Amino acid sequence: FKEQGGSLLAEEAKLNYQKDMLLADLPYEVKKAYDLACDKGAGIAVAELDGDMCSACKYQFMRGRLIEMMREAPVSVCNSCGRLLIIKKD
């Protein structure tokens, strides 16, 4: 158990380092939006638009808001949980 826990902690540290390196390359406004979403989303800043719902909080968007979000693609913000939403156009 200790060995597995130790490897998980090492992996977490590696991933946090990689995240920090990626965040350092982002423009200030994008990083600010990410940090805000991270705070609102209990440490998880990004979700995906899954049909008409946020994949994190399951908030279902009204048609008008969906149209607006498609114009904002590839990234929007969930009205409910505040996470950044990745929008994949098919």
Image: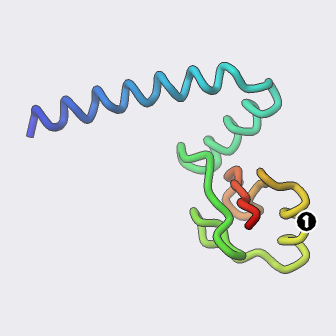
**Residue farthest front in this picture:** 90
Quadrant of the image occupied by residue 11: top left
Q: Residue at x 36, y 32 (%)?
A: 12
Residue 54 drawn above or below residue 7: below
Say which element carries label 1: helix
Instruction: Give the labeled residue for mark 1.
Output: 68
Placement of 12 over or under 40, stated as above or below: above
Residue 6 in percent (x, y) is at: 19, 29
The residue depicted at 18 percent of the width and 36 percent of the height is 5
- The residue positioned 67% from the left and 59% from the top of the image is 81
For residue 63, which quarter of the picture? bottom right
Left or right position of 7 against 72: left
Residue 50 position within the rendered picture, expressed as x and y whole percent measured from the top left: 64, 70
Instruction: Residue type at mark 1: give it.
Output: Glu
Q: Residues within 10 Å of mark 1 (few under 14, many from 20)?
A: few
Q: Quadrant of the N terminus?
A: top left
**Residue 86 spot, x, y in % from top left:** 69, 54
Query: In which quadrant will I find the C terminus?
Result: bottom right
